[in-house]
Image: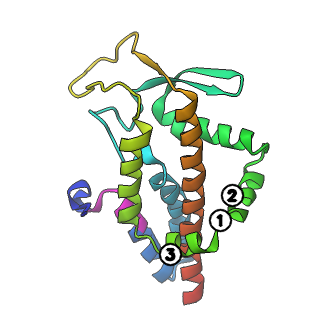
Amino acid sequence: TSLEAFCPDGACVVEKIKSFTTTLRDSADEAERRAALMYLIHFVGDIYQPLHCAERKCDQGGNLEHVNFYLKHEERADRRLHSVWDSDLVDRAMADAKVRQDRVYAIQLAGSIKRRDADKWAQQPFDEVAWEGHAIAEHHVYRGIPLQDFCGITEKPAHPPITDLDPEYEKEGERIVRERFQKAGVRLAELIEEKRTQE
């Protein structure tokens, strides 16, 4: 499915990834290439986060949805759904892996990737990555979150409804986050490796 309707004049993350990839590959300006690489690292990470690829009833990618998240024996009360998928599920995944350092966790994730999966992920077009994230948001991220219409609301409610995320939701979310990290790492490595083979 085309993303054209969502990318007026190339103003979306998919087109920016393509543009910075071209800069990284073709530019002779070292500073320009360095900046392109920094943006690519950021944007590739973004596009693999499902709530950067979806919005429900003007909820700003889950930023207006309030939830309670549980990490082991710690309750993280009144969190934004977007934050749960940006950081809380990552914290849970690292806690379950019994690691505290990002680098150690990254090494663990990289070591558990199957070669056949990596080969497939490395070639996935970013349009497909965005649609995949959108589907994950629809079928998993918003599951159990009551539908609210935020369109046209000018004032945020003083006491917004808060949804308790159940253990099954959090367990599935952790699995999704772990796989999205792996896919993002493989895809980013492919972009960088593609540049090196051009040199």
Q: Amino acid at mark 3?
A: Leu
| Residue depth check, mark 1 versus mark 3: number of the one nearer the observer | 1
Using a 10 Å C-alpha cutoff, classify the residue at mark 2 as few (fewer than 14 neighbours), some (14 to 19) or many (20 or more): some
- Left/right of residue 96 with respect to residue 163 in the rendered view: right
Residue drawn at point x = 25 percent, y = 54 percent: 6
| Residue depth check, mark 2 versus mark 3: number of the one nearer the observer | 2
Mark 1, secondary structure of its residue = loop
Q: Quadrant of residue 66?
A: top left
Where is the C terminus found, in terms of image quarters? bottom right
Where is 15 relative to 150, above or below? below
| Residues at discs 1 and 2 in contact (Cβ within 8 Å) | yes
Using a 10 Å C-alpha cutoff, classify the residue at mark 1 as few (fewer than 14 neighbours), some (14 to 19) or many (20 or more): some
Mark 2, secondary structure of its residue = helix
Residue drawn at point x = 42 percent, y = 31 percent: 63
| Residues at discs 1 and 3 in contact (Cβ within 8 Å) | no
Q: Estimate the spatial distance between the alpha carbons at disc 1 and disc 3, rounded to whole Å.
A: 26 Å
Residue that carries the numbered disc 2 in the rendered image: 109
Q: Amino acid at mark 1?
A: Ile
Q: Amino acid at mark 2?
A: Leu
Using a 10 Å C-alpha cutoff, classify the residue at mark 3 as few (fewer than 14 neighbours), some (14 to 19) or many (20 or more): many
In the rendered image, residue 91, in percent from the top left (x then y), is placed at 66, 38
Mark identifier at residue 24? 3
Residue drawn at point x = 53 percent, y = 55 percent: 45
- Left/right of residue 176 with respect to residue 96 in the rendered view: left
Quick one: label 2 or label 3, which is nearer the N terminus?
3
In the rendered image, residue 138, in percent from the top left (x then y), is placed at 35, 42
In the rendered image, residue 108, in percent from the top left (x then y), is placed at 74, 57
Main secondary structure along the magenta-highlighted residues: helix
Quick one: label 1 or label 3, which is nearer the N terminus?
3
Mark identifier at residue 113? 1
Mark 3, secondary structure of its residue = helix
The stretch in magenta equals: 10-17
